[in-house]
């Protein structure tokens, strides 16, 4: 019963966010044809504002579970969104084994997860080191990675454009624990995201 209620609420909320983004931000969606219609997918994009996660959720046409920092539950609205979209909560600054297991389980079931390599809003601008979480999940699960670039949504340019790139396949590295491999994959993924966000 709870799952059914959550599914209905998720459908309503996703529709409301989509309409709001289309009207207020005049959102343009590019590259939907690049998103695999089935099978596990890891969505990852540049992170600028709190709008980014719901924007991806309502435009990708695939259900996805976002990895979100645990502190977001302190905000009632964000906590509600996390519940509605079944977010995977992550404890910051530590290796959260439970979140890792839940993410891998989701991918194993053929579902999708989403996260931001920057780790925080405007991480690149702040000089933060790009996290290798996407690469880790890709080589552990064999799931394809769909990079996403978001631009606009500012006072100077309210119109938002979200672009989904071609899926990246790292199945040849499946099971690898080599840090150089993870760093190489992370660099390539982030390079794709930056290009799509231009």
Image: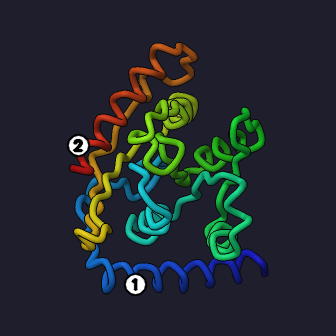
Secondary structure category for the residue under label 2: helix
What residue is shown at x 48% (from left), y 30% (from top)? 129
Quarter of the image where one finds residue 68: bottom right
Per the rendering, the mark at residue 85 is none
To which residue does mark 1 refer?
20
User: x%, y% of residue 31?
Assistant: 24, 58
User: x%, y% of residue 164?
Assistant: 30, 54
> Measured along the vertical axis of the image, is residue 139 above or below residue 53?
above
Using the rendered image of the protein, determine whether residue 144 is visible from the camera's viewpoint. Answer: no
User: x%, y% of residue 44?
Assistant: 43, 47
User: x%, y% of residue 127?
Assistant: 44, 34
User: In this image, 142 relative to 89: left or right?
Assistant: left
Picture quarter with the N terminus: bottom right
Near mark 2 (Cα within 10 A), the count class, few <14, some 14-19 or many ≥20, is: few
Using the rendered image of the protein, determine whether residue 197 is visible from the camera's viewpoint. Answer: yes
Say which of 155 and 10 sits in front. 155
Do the numbered discs 2 and 1 sit on residues whose CB atoms are within 8 Å?
no
Say which of 126 and 68 sits in front. 126
What residue is shown at x 30% (from left), y 62% (from top)? 162
To which residue does mark 2 refer?
195
What residue is shown at x 40% (from left), y 39% (from top)? 124
Distance from disc 2 to disc 1, alpha carbons, whole Å, reads 26 Å
Whichever of labels 2 and 1 marks the residue nearer the N terminus, that label is 1
User: In this image, 33 relative to 20: left or right?
Assistant: left
Secondary structure category for the residue under label 1: helix
User: In this image, 82 relative to 166: left or right?
Assistant: right
Near mark 1 (Cα within 10 A), the count class, few <14, some 14-19 or many ≥20, is: few
What residue is shown at x 48% (from left), y 51% (from top)? 121
Say which of 90 and 157 sits in front. 157
């Amino acid at each position: 019963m709870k799952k059914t209620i959550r599914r209905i609420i998720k459908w309503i909320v996703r529709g409301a966010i989509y309409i709001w983004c289309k009207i207020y931000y005049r959102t343009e969606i590019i590259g939907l044809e690049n998103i695999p219609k089935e099978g596990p997918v890891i969505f990852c994009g540049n992170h600028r504002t709190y709008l980014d996660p719901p924007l991806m959720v309502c435009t990708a046409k695939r259900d996805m579970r976002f990895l979100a920092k645990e502190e977001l539950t302190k905000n009632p609205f964000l906590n509600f969104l996390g519940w509605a979209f079944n977010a995977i909560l992550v404890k910051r600054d530590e290796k959260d084994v439970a979140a890792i297991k839940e993410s891998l389980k989701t991918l194993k079931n053929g579902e999708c997860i989403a996260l931001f390599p920057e780790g925080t809003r405007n991480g690149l601008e702040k000089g933060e080191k790009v996290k290798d979480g996407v690469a880790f999940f890709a080589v552990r699960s064999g799931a394809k990675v769909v990079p996403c670039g978001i631009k606009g949504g500012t006072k100077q340019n309210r119109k938002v454009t979200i672009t989904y790139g071609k899926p990246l396949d790292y199945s040849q590295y499946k099971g690898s624990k080599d840090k150089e491999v993870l760093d190489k994959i992370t660099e390539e993924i982030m390079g794709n995201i930056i290009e799509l966000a231009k």
